[in-house]
Image (cartoon, rainbow, N blue to C red):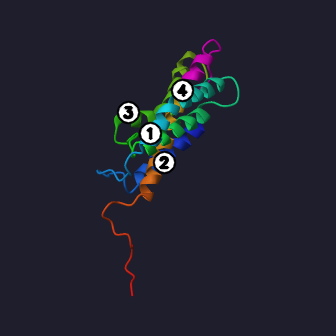
Amino acid sequence: TLLELCVVLLAGLSVYALHPGNDRREPRWPAPDPVLAGYTRALLPFIVLVAGYVLWAGSHRAGGAFQAGSILAGAGVLWVLSHGGAGPDIARGWVRLALVAGVTAFCGLGLILLPGGGAFLQWPPQAAKALIVSIESAATVSIAITLVLLFRAGLDLLIPIPGAEAGGEGGGA
């Protein structure tokens, strides 16, 4: 799971480092769709509930942070599409914190237990469940935010910049 979190974080940071629109000031998104916005508002609580269940179930059987994060990211994609591109912005501090929350929680809790004589990521049996659910929760948020940011970056590449030439390179008769 730690390696998965590192790969997702690296992908998210790489796309935004190389993304040509990462410094855009004006939104290029279509106008919000009221029908999709209503649909999203109606479904959002159920999507969050399902993601929470998958996260909790994953602490003792198959499933967990990545599946729950993907479900939450689906809700985030619906939100972005239904609200004219409004969503997490890499320039905001809370988004940056959420991006690294999973890796930070994983490594931080693993390192905190080292001075007590334990090995890295070796949890005390009495606290294992709570620590695992805490790490998985942070990882879920990190994965969801990263996937929504990746979606927004990809969609930004597909939406033409207003006022840009549609024809591309020269050509003509």
Q: Which of marks 2 and 3 is nearer the N terminus?
A: 3
How far apart are labels 4 and 2 at the CA level?
Answer: 21 Å
Tell me, yes or no, if residue 1 can be seen here.
no
169 horizontally vs 151: left or right: left
First in sequence: mark 1 vs mark 4: 1
Mark 2 and mark 1: span between their CA atoms? 18 Å
Q: Earlier in the sequence, mark 3 or mark 1?
A: 1
Q: Is residue 62 magenta?
A: no
Residues shaded magenta: 120-137
Kind of residue at badge 3: Trp
Asked where in the image residue 171 lies, by quadrant, the reply is bottom left
Looking at the rendered structure, which numbered label has been put on residue 137?
Answer: 4
Q: Are marks 2 and 3 in contact (CB under 8 Å)?
A: no
Viewed as shown, does residue 117 lie left or right of 35? right
Q: Which residue is drawn at 55% across and 20% down?
A: 113
SS label for mark 4: helix
Horizontally, residue 106 falls left or right of residue 17, namely right
Q: In which quarter of the image is residue 80?
A: top left
Q: Which amino acid does label 4 sit on?
A: Ser
80 up-or-down from 1: above or below: below
Q: Would you name the residue on which mark 2 appears? A: 151
Residue denoted by label 1:
37
Identity, as a three-letter code, of the amino acid under mark 1: Ala
- Residue designated by label 3: 94
